[in-house]
Structures are given as structure tokens and as C-alpha cells.
Image (cartoon, helix red, strand yellow):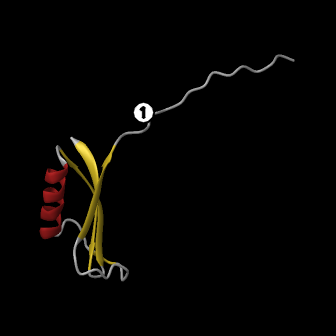
Amino acid sequence: MTAYRIRASMGGQSIDHVVNAATSKEAILKLSELVGDGSVEVANDGFTGNTVPHITYEELKDESEEDRTVEKTSTPRA
């Protein structure tokens, strides 16, 4: 399972939610179900006035161990 952060906005309303799913398509469909059954609340943001739905998503990774740079340093002795 992968965590996907999905953001959607249209007509002054928006959603920003993280969903766990196997694929991005499954994540978007799962979020749609969560909104439909009232588990995820749609926020009135008063900012997004577009008339066409705008949906973005990103795959979230556990970055606590990934891409960590560790450098060895030495301290001069006094």
C-alpha cells in the first residue's frame, strides 16, 4: 500500500486528504467513496472559484530513512 495525498477543488470548495491504496486510481476512487459517505468533509475555502474540478495527487514516501545524508566529521583534539 502507498499513501497518496489528494487535493481537489472546485467552486469555492476543497478537499485535502491522505488515502492508502495500491494505485493512484484506487486512491482517488477511495477518496470519492469517503466523501460520498460523509467520512471526509469538504471545506468551503472561498478561494477556488474554478468551474472545472481541479485534482492533484502525490505519492508520499517515508522519508525518515530515505535520502538521508550522513557525514562523518572529526573534531580536532585540544
Q: Is residue 13 left or right of residue 31?
A: right
Mark 1: secondary structure: loop
Q: Position of residue 76 (x, y in %)?
A: 80, 19
Instruction: Please say if 31 is above or below 21.
Output: below
* Residue 11 drawn above or below residue 58: below
In the rendered image, residue 13, in percent from the top left (x then y), is placed at: 28, 78
Residue 37 visible? The answer is no
Outermost right residue: 78
Identify the residue at horizontal 25%, vertical 65% (top origin).
Answer: 55
**In this picture, is 75 found above or below 41?**
above
- Tell me what residue is drawn at x 87 percent, y 18 percent: 78
Quarter where residue 47 is shown: bottom left
Q: For the N terminus, give its image quadrant.
A: top left
Under mark 1, the amino acid is Glu
| Label 1 sits on residue | 66
Percent of width and height locating residue 44: 31, 80
